[in-house]
Amino acid sequence: MTSKIPGMQHLHSFTQRKAGTCAELRKAQEGLKNDLILRAARGEQTERAPCWIMRQAGRYLPEFRKIREDHDFFTCCRDPELASEITVQPIRRYRGLLDAAIIFSDILVIPQAMGLEVEMLPAKGPHFPAPLVTPRDTERLRKKVDVERELGYVYDAIRLTRTKLDGEVPLIGFCGAPWTLMAYMVEGGGSKTFEKAKTWLFKYPEESKELLQRIADVAVEFLVGQVVAGAQMLQVFDSWAGELSPSDFRTFSLPYLRSIAASVRDALSLRSITCPPLIIFAKGALGHSMPEIVKAGYDVVGLDYTVEPSVARKVVELASPGRAISSKTNTASGANEAAHRLALQGNMDPAVLYAGKEAIERKVDEMLRARKGGFGGGGAYICNLGHGITPGVDPEAVKWFLKAVHRVSEEVNSARDEE
Ligand SMILES: Cc1c2[nH]c(c1CCC(=O)O)Cc1[nH]c(c(CCC(=O)O)c1C)Cc1[nH]c(c(CCC(=O)O)c1C)Cc1[nH]c(c(C)c1CCC(=O)O)C2
């Protein structure tokens, strides 16, 4: 991570040096029966690739739909008992097959905390009854967001979930990235063309940057609060990154992604809390900006399904050579934020889950074997889909996927499959 603030680089080095050896960190890990994902995120070789699924707690699960029959979506998010219950549903169903839980919530809780109303319409998705039409509308946003007061329910849900998980697997906290959230706040919902949000970027660039910064400030405080409550890893979702041109991504998204990572590390270090692994998922932007994304200050880069794993490995090597070296030769060097190998996460097309057992097994094989262009057995890898699982997927297909990942990845990791 590079910081323009004098003295900060030293602070970052110190935090990172601490991160490798810190007793607090070890203790936190000791409470876990399975810390595979934390080790992979720190660039280590693992006995097999840890695996979780974006949107693993969701509508494809009948037990989730059952809860939703009686409760509105945001009621589920705001009720710690319901949110924690939904979070552990996939962990229970796929016992021993998933290596992390992700707290049940939504990226749109930040716009709500900033003062905008958001509803979840059946079959339509998120809807903002009063979106930000012109920059003047930002006056409707809260000047100072009391994150603890507005989003404390997420912290409560995290605490309760940690108790329910009882160290079974680590718990991931998350938030939406500034550009993706701004797009929702201005469009008023999903969009195909993003014409309203893009009009803002091109017509009101300075006001857009102000809004992006306000969102980033809330995101930092929210992520830090999630760690304090017990989140053991964090992911930032920039789901609409790929809607921007390369230069607009570098102007309106990347600087905020960078500053979120740096500020979360700084804020935690000031409170003497070890920063957990940070994951960035900038969907659709890797094709043009992967070298910048791998240097944005995160521990793990999530890949969407348009990126070939072996190509991503090469880009990491070229863009950030120190972070491509095997952790064996690079552990505890601790000189800077590149102290450990950068890890990759992803990236099977979620639609493969519709194609039956054989296709799933074939595609998992392809994703994991180096000679097929896959991630290979070198560690520093977290298995996932290349985007969120969709509602029509058969839960049995997910089991086939997870079982195939365990089987193939044990094989390639023990053989250090590099062929
Ligand atoms: C863009 C985005 C949103 N939300 C999210 C993203 C980024 C990830 C991505 O790109 O897929 C992130 C999210 N949303 C949800 C989670 C919970 C944790 C998990 O991953 O299991 C997470 C991490 C629950 C949810 N968020 C939502 C549901 C379904 C709502 C319902 O029950 O009716 C769930 C389980 C609703 C939601 N929320 C959002 C949309 C577009 C929708 C409707 C369409 C859809 O379901 O995909 C916004």
Image (cartoon, grey):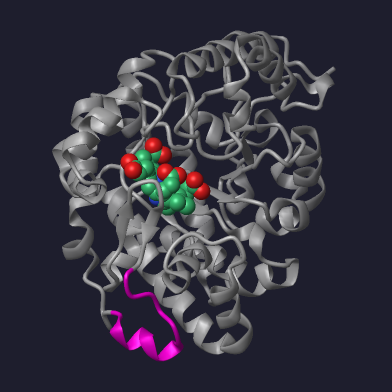
Q: Single out the residue that lies furthest toward the front.
A: 123
Residue 240 x/y as whole percent? 57, 58
Whether residue 218 is visible = yes
Magenta stretch holds residue 130 = yes
At 65% from the left and 11% from the top, the residue drawn is 408
Magenta stretch holds residue 225 = no
Q: In the visual, does 120 lie left or right of 41?
A: left
Residue 154 x/y as whole percent? 24, 50
Q: In the visual, does 290 lie left or right of 192?
A: right
The N terminus appears in which quarter of the rendering?
Answer: bottom right
Q: In the visual, does 255 lie left or right of 39?
A: right
Placement of 47 over or under 333, stated as above or below = above
Which one is nearer the viewer's eye here, 127 or 99? 127
Q: In the visual, does 264 lie left or right of 2?
A: left
At 60% from the left and 75% from the top, the residue drawn is 198
Specify start and end residues of the magenta stretch as a single range: 129-141
Placement of 110 over or under 286, stated as above or below = below
Please identify the quarter of the rendering in which residue 200 is found: bottom right
Please identify the quarter of the rendering in which residue 109 is found: bottom left
At 48% from the left and 59% from the top, the residue drawn is 190
Residue 18 x/y as whole percent? 45, 47
Residue 314 x/y as whole percent? 81, 40
Whether residue 22 is visible = no
Which one is nearer the viewer's eye here, 84 or 133? 133
Q: How many marks?
A: 0
The C terminus appears in which quarter of the rendering?
Answer: top right
